[in-house]
Amino acid sequence: MKKALMYGAGNIGRGFIGQLFHMSGYEISYIDVNMAVIDQLNTDGQYPIYITDGDDYREYLVTGVHGVNGRDNEAIAEAMAAADIMATAVGVNILKFIAAPFAGGVRRRMEKGIEAPLNVIICENMIEADQYFAGLVKENLNDEEKAYFDTHIALVEPSIGRMVPATPKEIAQKNPLAVCVEPYCELPVDKHAFKGEIPAIQNMVPFAPFDFFIRRKLFMHNMSHALTAYFGALRGYTYIWEANADPDIRALAANALGEASMALHLAYGVALEELKAFSDNLIERFDNKLLGDTIERVGKDTKRKLSVNDRLVGAALLCEKLGIPSTYITAGIAAGLLFAPESDESAIEVAKDAKENGVFHALSTYCGIGEDAPIASRVKAYYEKLLEGKPFSELFA
């Protein structure tokens, strides 16, 4: 049987990529440092995915799975040597920690004289995650190994559109390996990044040029999702579906999507009707109660999510570059500067800096936006109104 290797046994790994690998006839091994998950994968050899279906769930069983200890570099190297395809879903901040073990796997494939290319789908929410990870890996390779990496290893960027939040408690109690997901299950990937024949993975759709899909995911899906979370937090909501049901917040997200749609339309020539349909579908998907997607999860880590090339600031800067008003997106940035749940050290740090050192200082430190940038003064004005508790309808007066 064909072998797939998934670096990261979290919700995206098990609840999305793992499902596609299983649907495509692969035996799947998961690498993770969470030994409770690894041990149960090896004991059970399967796990359930609960796909939301209206007011109920449809169960999909992923079988033929194994676990690999993420601290055992020898086991990781052997698993990579045996893999026909691979993916990562560990989180951008963790890539630097898996680079050395991954390099060990590259080295093992070279030592064994494996000529078949290994295509690795890099499922991380970061523009040019493939280049970033390649740089990290090559720091652990000598010149001969780097040459092998360049000719035999392909790092492929996808656009992860499926929403896979933390598993609801009542489902996790039945089986800690269970994952709850939405029905949307398409995986666009960069067609030109593959080496050799493109593997036949069900629901994987190769596109070229791929840059548009990366930015559509980040500047539309991720941007509006985070904006909904930040404004939802200001109104005391717990779940995304609650915030999305608030007509004020729904309108803010829809208007922000309109700004991003116009920017992507001008940048890539994609029809506005297509982008409008994508926006409408997103808003409807945010209504999904069964996902149990929380405001805290979607908004967390503002140090990353408000960074210069990420969802909100990146979208706003693209709008500015193309002469499109970014009124609603910049209001989302202001709301993000106020987001500070007790469990989120990153968000607390950013919010504290904005409060104590001023909005301009926080924008410069965390968002890459100078005080003289056109959007800086608007973010500051929105921030001050939100801090005063002004109604959302008065933000733009």
Image (cartoon, rainbow, N blue to C red):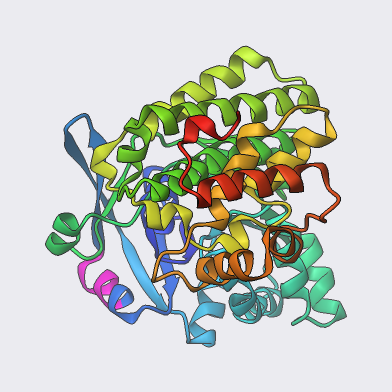
Taking depth in this image into account, of 159 and 109 the one nearest to the observer is 159
Q: Which residues are magenta?
A: 39-45
In the rendered image, which quarter contains the C terminus? top right
Q: Residue at x 78, y 69 (%)?
A: 135
Taking depth in this image into account, of 354 and 367 the one nearest to the observer is 354
Answer above or below: position of 97 versus 355. Answer: below
In this rendering, position of residue 378 left or right of residue 45: right
Answer whether residue 314 is visible to the viewer in this image: yes
Answer above or below: position of 181 versus 323. Answer: below
User: Image quarter for residue 346?
Assistant: bottom right
Expressed as whole percent of the image width and height from the top left, the position of residue 27 reads 39, 58
Answer above or below: position of 83 versus 336. Answer: below
In this rendering, position of residue 175 left or right of residue 125: left
Q: Residue at x 40, y 34 (%)?
A: 184
Judge whether residue 42 is colored magenta: yes
Expressed as whole percent of the image width and height from the top left, the position of residue 123 reads 56, 54
> How many numbered circles does the render carry?
0
